[in-house]
Image (spheres, rainbow, N blue to C red):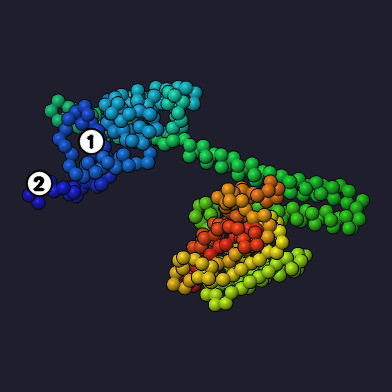
Amino acid sequence: MNGHAVPGDRPLDQSPAALLSAALSLGRAAADHPVPAPGPVLISSMVCADELPDGLVIADHAGRVTVFNRAAARLTGQPVRAAIGADVRQILPLRDADGRSWWACADPYGGLSIRSRHPEMPLFLADGTELMVTVSYVRAPRWATLQQRHPGHPAPAAGEVQRLVIMLRGAQQRARLERSRADLVSTVAHELRSPLTSVKGFTATLLAKWGRFTDDQKKVMLETVNADADRVTRLITELLDVSRIESGRMEVHRQLVSVPERVEKLVAGRVAAGDPADRYRVVISDRLPETWLDADKVDQILGNLIENAVRHGAGTVTVVVEPLEAAGARAVVGAGGGIAVSVRDEGDGVAPELVPRVFRQFWRAKRRGGAGLGLYIVKGLVEAHGGAITVQRAPEGGAEFRFTMPASQPEYG
């Protein structure tokens, strides 16, 4: 109000982003060109540069480094004190995969005046360190005049580079992503090859020699084709579920669901399909709260855990449904409490050193059958409901998968 600056205040026409840009440009330049001490806002903005997770390098119109944060020092191995004021082309001797100098090829200071940025690209330092580099240009406005901003310092020509803003990221994250994609492609190709080969073989055989087979032989072949087609469909469904989980697009359509009824229905279906009835035991506690869940996803969770216990466990498969409080939970989710469901077997269990890997993608206890996505999807579906899942040793000595579900509330509208 009286013309004096108040700590923390800023002109109304200057946004925080503008102040940060000014701070980054001026703060580090003090090493070569002393300027009046910046105010509290500028100092706090300078600190922000060192708190960035990615490397930030800013060079002025002459190529002198004015900003070099701690992340940039860590990624390049250059000390901050040595970098400030030095030529950016010497501090960052960037080269492409063919060994050509990026500075010579791109010519950022003398190239096209209409360029505003270079998208992220992999470049290498002199020691072979790979970095993901993004470059932005700060240019003089097109309406720049010949007025002088400071005595002895003419205004830049229209479109002239005033600053280069260079962002640096390590390439390890991209390498991990590429390995994950390669694993996905390899696993999917392996899982699809076997059933598709079977489908192709039986179909071609039937078409070529239909009259030579009896009806029983034809039925066996068609049943095999049908089973392999179901296997392919199941794998594609699992991949779609994985995609939704990773992108956060898993939708939960809540309705009143009786988990004990879903358990009993799944067990009855397995017994009807040929499993012995004494292989399963269902224990239902009293005073279960109402649960508003996605019925289809609950069936998918229970079906996968029961199938996992049957396939990899031994003895009796026990399913226990109890209130969350009775399960020994320290905190009850929501005012309505929740439930805990345990699926136990009497097999060898899961070794303690393998517990952290159980819910990862493509993890399989035995190198046979399945794509290793089932438990990963189960974990994603449980967490989409606001629950949690763990694996531990069962009282009978096998594995126990226990997941909790909040009672939640019905959806309206």
Could you say where residue 368 lies in the image, as x and y percent from the top left?
Answer: 70, 48
* Location of mark 2 (residue): 4
Q: Nearer the viewer, residue 53 or 33?
A: 53
The residue beneath circle 1 is: 27
Q: Judge from the rendering whether residue 247 lies leftward or rightward of residue 24; answer left or right.
A: right
Residue 204 visible here: yes
Q: Amino acid at mark 1?
A: Gly
User: Mark 1 or mark 2: which comes first in sequence?
Assistant: 2
Q: Quadrant of residue 399?
A: bottom right
Task: Give the x, y percent position of residue 117.
Answer: 37, 35
Q: Judge from the rendering whether residue 397 lies leftward or rightward of residue 77; answer left or right.
A: right
Marks 1, 2: nearer the viewer: 1
Q: From this viewpoint, is residue 65 visible?
A: no
- Image: 333 above or below 198: below
Q: Is residue 256 above or below residue 311?
A: below
Instruction: Please tell me the numbered disc located at residue 278.
Output: none
Residue at 71% x, 44% y is: 193
| Amino acid bearing label 2 | His
Position of residue 377 relative to residue 192, above or below, is below
Residue ID at (70%, 64%): 316
Q: Nearer the viewer, residue 139 or 389?
A: 389
Residue in the picture at 27% in, 41% down? 47
In percent of width and height, residue 18 lies at 25, 43
Identify which residue, 79 or 119, lies in the foreground. 79
- The local secondary structure at tag 1 comes to helix
SS class, disc 2: loop
Which residue sits at x=58%, y=51%?
Answer: 352
How far is disc 1 from disc 2 in space, using C-alphas?
A: 21 Å
Taking the image as shown, residue 311 lies to the left or right of residue 105, namely right
